[in-house]
Amino acid sequence: MKLNRLKKAVLLAITVGMTMTYSAQAVASDIVQTQQHKARTIVTTDGEIDDMDSFLRFLLYTNEMNVDGIIYSSSQWHYKGDGKGTKFISEMPLTRDWYGEKTDLRWCGAEWIQNFIGKYGEVYQNLLKHDKNYPAPEALLAKVKVGNIDFEGEMEKDTEGSDHIKNILLDAGTEPVYLQVWGGTNTIARALKAIEDEYNNTPEWDAIYAKVAKKAVIYAILDQDATYQKYIAKTWPDIKVLYNSAQFWCFAYDWPKTVPEELKPYLQGKWMAKNIKYGHGPLMDEYMVWGDGHAITEDSDDKYGDIDYMKKSGRGQYDFISEGDTPAYLHLIDVGMRSLENPASGGWSGRLIKSPTNKNRWEDGENVADYNPHTKQFDKSYPQTRWVNAIQNDFAARVLWMTEDYDKANHAPKVSVKDKLDITAKAGQKIKLSGTATDPDGDKLNYKWWQYQEAGTYQGVLELKHAGRKEIDIKIPQDAKIGDTIHLILEVTDNGVPPMTRYQHVIVTIGE
């Protein structure tokens, strides 16, 4: 995600007055992964200010995934240059017009990741009090590599970063590796090109292609260079792609225009200063908010710390700036929404449906909208925006893990459903759903059952009596057709400070 000005070129008008819902679609079996196992992932980043804030939050979630790599890359917004004075002009129309010909562009160096991991190291022992699965800082540092950073889209040469991605994709593991794209795809493209160069026209090529195509899953926030379209899509069409081009805006620079008034407090200065920025140790000291006095000297476009610029921009002091890339790893966090099984089921990273033209691509956009009860309109950002309060409270709770003992902080409840999460029922049939939850802190729990109507194919609305109880009785509507799906969510929130929320996602399929 890059720059608030980008929205002028890519942010489309929110669909108004839509009457249809958009359904979850079946996912090819080779992308299905249960969320009982931590996902493998590699982060690629170009070092935008919002990448930096995304990375600081990411460090607090590294206990929830297997981090295989953290790679410096480039994009249309950031590149180092080759040090020889070579001039470069962007292939992407927007940045070509804005910046023209450059020898380097807003490059913030290849040290900031290590510096942030160093700050993580200062709070690491306290994080272990809350979860023994946090990786050691030394282990994370060993995964940091420099990829293709000289220019936007540069993928002609092997780099330490591209070699690392190549080796991970070729290793003995068979589970998916989620390649997070916070900048351009060029370092990933170089890794794939190196695999092609080594194995194409050899007896091993078909098997290597199938292995890599089944293993690699790209989660991209926009296209920030041309390497996906020019190389990956053409040469590796069977690689799965999750493409977020609209829903991420609620966590990006222009969030005040996307987030409803009722949810804005979780991104405004009073909440951010208290819960995230100040008084929580060295890692959050690095987190950047509006009007906090910070200045990234290498990035001429970073004026967010300046009070005068803040006022001119209509922002409040300490307001959230942007973490446009955070949805790429929220997809991997097991909160009970089953998003790894099917991106179309929805969850903290939004809701993506299978492309009508590409069986290996899931995307958002005009055809993916949830009903926004605050605006009473269908909204193409709301599949992500609807979770803002839960996501922010979860972040704030983890921030406290860096300084507080276990018994002084909050931890998420564990939620379960008595029977299967996938149920077959007939039209007119009555079924009972029984959920339960335990809280590690002994907090009081609030239960709420609700229908995620847009995720299902059944177009009607179920009547959910006693939705605040652990158990509910449901009658499948008579007009439900064979093959329809109904998605029901059990949402459980504790009364800790900050409150934390987890879910169970039940899918009812109408049978004969």
Image (cartoon, rainbow, N blue to C red):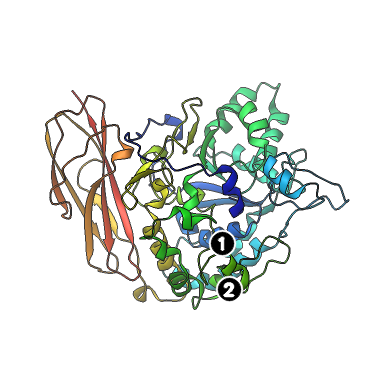
Residue marked by disc 1: 53
Question: Does residue 232 sit above or below 279 in this rendering?
Answer: above
Residue 430 image-quadrant placement? top left
Residue 450 in the image, given as x and y percentages of width and height: 24, 47
Q: Residues within 10 Å of mark 2 (few under 14, many from 20)?
A: some
Local secondary structure at mark 1: helix
Of the numbered discs in the image, which one, if any, rests on residue 285? none
Q: Nearer the viewer, residue 268 or 132?
A: 268
Farthest residue, direction right:
84
Residue 275 in the image, given as x and y percentages of width and height: 44, 72
Residue 362 in the image, given as x and y percentages of width and height: 47, 35
Local secondary structure at mark 2: loop
Image position of 370 (left or right of 54): left
Q: Is residue 338 visible?
A: no
Name the residue type under label 1.
Asp
Question: Does residue 8 sit above or below 193 in this rendering?
Answer: below
Quadrant where the C terminus sits is top left
Residue 267 in the image, given as x and y percentages of width and height: 45, 64
Name the residue type under label 2.
Asp
Of the numbered discs in the image, which one, if any, rests on residue 292? 2
Q: Mark 2 to mark 1: distance in Å? A: 14 Å
Residue ID at (61%, 23%): 206
Residue ID at (56%, 38%): 172
Farthest residue, direction bottom:
279
Q: Residues within 10 Å of mark 1 (few under 14, many from 20)?
A: many
Residue 167 image-quadrant placement? top right
Image position of 12 (left or right of 419): right
Circle 2/circle 1 CB separation < 8 Å:
no
How many marks do you count on the picture? 2
Q: Nearer the viewer, residue 444 or 427?
A: 427
